Amino acid sequence: MSDQPDPPTSSAESTVPGRIVAVLGRGVVPATEPILRADDLGALRGDGIFETVHIRGGRPWMLREHLDRMSRSAARLELALPSPDALTDLVTTALAEWPPAVEGALRLVCTRGPETGGDVTVYATVTAIASTVLGSRRNGITVATASLGFAADARQRAPWLLGGAKTVSYAVNMASQRWAMAQGADDVLWVSADGYALEGPTSTLVWLTGSTLCTVPAEATGILAGTTARWLFDHATDVGFDTDERLTTPGALADADGVWFTSSVRGVVEIRAIDGVKMRNATDTERLRSLLGYGA
């Protein structure tokens, strides 16, 4: 499922703006106003980066961690990202009129800017959480595996593959999810050419073996290091879990005591089946969700 939320549809949220847009140096602009030039390299070549931040109580959750990851992405793309203070001010501007009672998602985007040269393009959008996201939190998801076509350690050896960078080049991610839905699944679990489970197009893979909470090692595989998964692992001892980073296979996950996708907007979502094979019922889903502070 995409991390792009749908606009609110319930009567209780009828007064919530469908989308707030704020541009660095300009402030909030009408949501329908064009903000990209025709030659912006973000649109032409997918040359840019972004972060999606969960909004709870009208405030951005783990903003510092997202800005840190955005800085790492910018370094890998050699992109002139504005200062954390400037980006924080943009986020504050975008959220100034957002109703605190409405759970939301803020996307912060930075592209390389015009093809002819000039400043980067930086903007933020805020939308309400989609009903499909809320449904996946409650009901869990099924996933289909799809090969990325290269070995688990390929991105570590090939920096031009931009392993670990969160770029706006999401065409493959979205195509993967459309393919999965056409197969009757809700999402995708990407698998390396040598058979290891890696991550989802918009999510981090997490699983439980006994009392050990596990995830895929980001540095060794080039997956995107999940901010939500990192927070979960940093606080796992609070609910009695040990933690480990290790490689696994889709087949081995059937023996796990729980399998989840984690992401900023969805939080913790239980994976109920992989390629039609049912996973064990995860009895700790609510425990993890409560630890993260996400609603049902």
Image: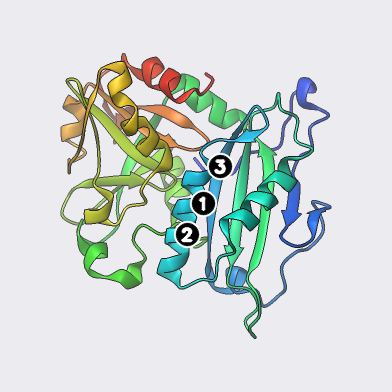
Mark 2 vs mark 3: in front: 2
Q: How far is the residue under mark 3 from the one under mark 1?
A: 10 Å
* Residue drawn at 23 percent across, 62 percent down: 150
For the question of whether residue 113 can be seen, the reply is yes
- Label 1 crowd (10 A; few <14 / some 14-19 / many >=20): many
* Residue drawn at 33 percent across, 32 percent down: 234
Query: On the image, which quarter does residue 48 sit in?
Result: bottom right
Q: Are marks 3 and 1 in contact (CB under 8 Å)?
A: no
Q: Are marks 2 and 3 in contact (CB under 8 Å)?
A: no
Three-letter amino acid code at disc 2? Ser
Three-letter amino acid code at disc 1? Leu
Query: On the image, which quarter does residue 100 sit in?
Result: top right
* Residue designated by label 3: 53
**Residue 287, image x, y percentages:** 37, 16
* Residue designated by label 1: 67
* Residue drawn at 42 percent across, 28 percent down: 268
Asked if residue 197 is positioned above or below residue 74 in the image, the reply reads above
Disc with the residue nearer the chain's start (3 vs 1):
3
**Residue 4, image x, y percentages:** 59, 44
Left or right? Give the position of 285 relative to 248.
Answer: right
* Residue designated by label 2: 71
Left or right? Give the position of 119 relative to 281.
Answer: right
Q: Judging from the image, what secondary structure is the residue with disc 1 in?
A: helix
Instruction: Spot the residue most to the front.
Output: 85
Q: Are marks 1 and 2 in contact (CB under 8 Å)?
A: yes
**Residue 121, image x, y percentages:** 66, 67
Asked if residue 107 is positioned above or below residue 230 in the image, the reply reads below
Q: How far is the residue under mark 1 from the one under mark 2?
A: 6 Å
